[in-house]
Amino acid sequence: MNKSIISLQQLIANSGMKVTPQRLAVFEAVMSMRTHPTADAIIARVQEQHPHIAVGTIYNVLDALVDKKLIVRVKTDKDSMRYDAVLDDHHHLYCSQTGEIVDYYNQELSLILTNYFKERGIPNFEIQDIKLQINGIYKPQ
């Protein structure tokens, strides 16, 4: 068994979930797809290698992985739900023309946002996380 599979098993186990072949297959698919895949893309990838895993099971595993904070959901302006396995502090660039989502790392921006809300806050609202999605269109280079 390769090292990355073992670490995925450890992440699942450390989250308090039982390691099952279905959970491992879905988690591995999301981790290998660095494109913020849709559920349909994840289903296609999983069923390519594991045709016996039912669609409902894949959706249930995705929900469980989100609940255990092993992956996150990313919503687009077209209300399409995507998934992200990168949990490091980052934001997203969303191309409204192509639907592409790209990770955007900028510590200075993250610090500005964090400090802004620390100083001002929002009445009757506890901020748990700040994720910025910047919508636009990629220009040809």
Image (cartoon, rainbow, N blue to C red):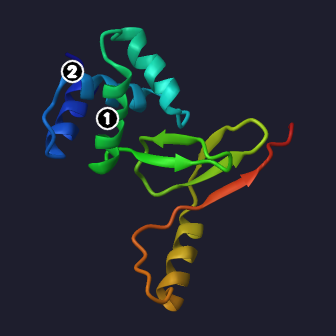
The amino acid sitting under disc 2 is Pro
Image quadrant in which you'd find residue 80: top right
The amino acid sitting under disc 1 is Asn
Give the tally of numbered discs. 2
Q: Where is residue 88 in the image (x, y as percent from the top left)?
A: 42, 52
Q: Is mark 2 on a helix, strand or loop?
A: helix
Q: Position of residue 49 (x, y in %)?
A: 37, 10
Q: What element carries label 1?
A: helix
Image quadrant in which you'd find residue 57: top left
Residue toward you, 106 or 114: 114
Quadrant location of the C terminus? top right
Q: Is residue 28 above or below residue 140?
A: above
Residue toward you, 109 or 39: 39
Looking at the rendered structure, which numbered label has been put on residue 21?
2
Q: Position of residue 31 (x, y in %)?
A: 40, 32
Q: Which residue is drawn at 36% across and 37% down?
A: 62
Quadrant location of the N terminus? top left
Q: Which residue is drawn at 67% across and 50% down?
A: 77
Residue toward you, 14 or 52: 52
Q: In this view, does 3 lie above or below 103?
A: above
Q: Mark 1 points at which residue?
A: 60
Q: Which residue is drawn at 62% across and 43% down?
A: 102
